[in-house]
Image (tube, rainbow, N blue to C red):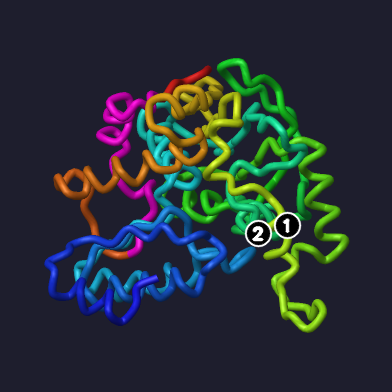
């Protein structure tokens, strides 16, 4: 979070952009950074929108769009991998692969395993609990945005590159709020291949109240149950040397092209062995970092331009997709 000293230093330094990497759960800090960038006249980018849950997801930032546009300032929200690269995939499909789109569904799955742990999320447990236990959002053109029950509408999705079929369920995610604003389609969903055991652990945490952020008294010490859970679990950023497998981020699109039905899955797969060898970080961490690096480069070169609060879908996807291979993150398309 930018302190008063940070803001003063930025105002004197000639900085032109701010990349907000604060975790999704610290919405107030993200609001502070978002507002600080506006006050300083900086281009702003984050990797996940503010975490007001359900239909309020991202509302604060979008409500400020007019102010940013009036000043000619650009804020790019949700520019990580999911959201981020998945949104670029949606824009690419709309531009090149379809004449009309019936449904866009972001589908995320992996076969990552962590040696020595029965339960070890490969990203923040705070984010895991927020996304999975908040009401999932679905978009339908004739209904708008609405929420469903947690872990609803299970389906089996066959992931590429040896990951294989996984049961995927609805999870709250920014893409559902972002994609329909710029991509014309009838329906948008986000489903995550969590696995039955993972879901049962989260349901147990919720049943016991261990997902709560409200502090309770424990022998004279005020502590949030969710902080205790996080403290008991390993830090996902440092599990790479114990982790094996691959993770897949992708966007499934159904519609028509040339009058014929079509379905495609545009995706990027990261192999943990490769990311550890080449970059020294685990696959999920690396995959999340690629998107904002490419996006910042495109903005710096003037290939992505605009004003207001915009999602990744608002820009031309072509230069982004063209650079993915050079960053070691080639995409693929499965019909």
At mark 2, the secondary structure is helix
At mark 1, the secondary structure is helix
Q: Determine crowd level at label 1: few under 14, some 14-19, many 20+ residues with C-alpha closer than 10 A.
A: many
Q: Check residue 158 for magenta coloring.
A: no
Identify the image quadrant of residue 40: bottom left
Q: Is residue 105 above or below residue 329?
A: below
For the question of whether residue 258 can be seen, the reply is: no
Q: Check residue 312 for magenta coloring.
A: yes
Point out the stretch of residues depicted in magenta.
Answer: 309-330
Q: Where residue 292 sits in the image (x, y, percent)?
A: 34, 46
| 52 left or right of 306 in image | right
Residue at the spot 42% in from the left edge and 24% down from the top edge: 277
Q: Determine crowd level at label 2: few under 14, some 14-19, many 20+ residues with C-alpha closer than 10 A.
A: many
Q: Is residue 302 above or below residue 196?
A: below
Residue at the spot 30% in from the left edge and 65% down from the top edge: 308
Q: Quadrant of the N terminus?
A: bottom left
| 128 left or right of 35 in image | right
Residue at the spot 43% in from the left edge and 69% down from the top edge: 61
Q: Where residue 93 sits in the image (x, y, percent)?
A: 42, 32
| Count of marks, rendered view | 2
Residue at the spot 66% in from the left edge and 22% down from the top edge: 158
| Residue designated by label 1 | 133
Q: Is residue 122 above or below residue 310?
A: above
Residue 130, numbered label: 2
| 227 left or right of 285 in image | right
Q: Are marks 1 and 2 in contact (CB under 8 Å)?
A: yes
Q: Where residue 201 sits in the image (x, y, percent)?
A: 81, 47
Give the alpha-carbon distance from disc 1 to disc 2, as whole Å. 6 Å
């Amino acid at each position: 979070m930018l302190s008063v000293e940070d803001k003063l230093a930025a105002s004197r330094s000639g900085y032109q952009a701010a990349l907000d990497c604060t975790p999704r759960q610290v919405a107030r800090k993200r609001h502070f950074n978002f507002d600080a960038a506006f006050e300083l006249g900086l281009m702003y980018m984050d990797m996940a929108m503010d975490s007001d849950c359900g239909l309020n997801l991202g509302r604060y930032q979008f409500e400020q769009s007019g102010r940013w546009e009036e000043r000619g300032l650009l804020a790019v929200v949700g520019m990580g991998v999911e959201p981020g690269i998945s949104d670029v995939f949606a824009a690419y499909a709309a531009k090149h692969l379809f004449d009309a789109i019936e449904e866009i569904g972001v589908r995320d799955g992996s076969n990552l395993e962590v040696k020595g742990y029965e339960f070890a999320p490969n990203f923040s447990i705070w984010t895991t609990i927020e996304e999975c236990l908040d009401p999932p959002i679905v978009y339908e053109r004739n209904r708008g945005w609405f929420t469903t029950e947690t872990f609803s509408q299970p389906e089996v999705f066959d992931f590429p590159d040896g990951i294989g079929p996984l049961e995927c369920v609805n999870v709250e995610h920014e893409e559902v709020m972002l994609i329909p604003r710029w991509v014309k389609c009838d329906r948008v969903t986000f489903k995550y291949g969590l696995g039955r055991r993972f879901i049962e652990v989260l349901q147990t945490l919720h049943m016991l109240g261990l997902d709560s952020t409200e502090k309770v008294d424990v022998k004279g010490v005020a502590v949030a149950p969710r902080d205790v859970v996080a403290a008991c679990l390993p830090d996902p950023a440092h599990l790479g040397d114990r982790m094996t497998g691959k993770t897949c981020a992708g966007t499934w699109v159904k519609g028509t092209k040339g009058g014929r039905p079509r379905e495609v899955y545009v995706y990027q797969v990261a192999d943990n062995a490769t990311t550890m060898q080449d970059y020294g970080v685990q696959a999920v961490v690396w995959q999340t970092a690629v998107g904002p690096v490419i996006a910042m480069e495109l903005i710096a070169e003037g290939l992505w331009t605009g004003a207001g609060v915009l999602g990744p879908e608002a820009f031309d996807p072509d230069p982004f997709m063209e650079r993915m291979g050079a960053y070691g993150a080639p995409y693929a398309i499965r019909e």
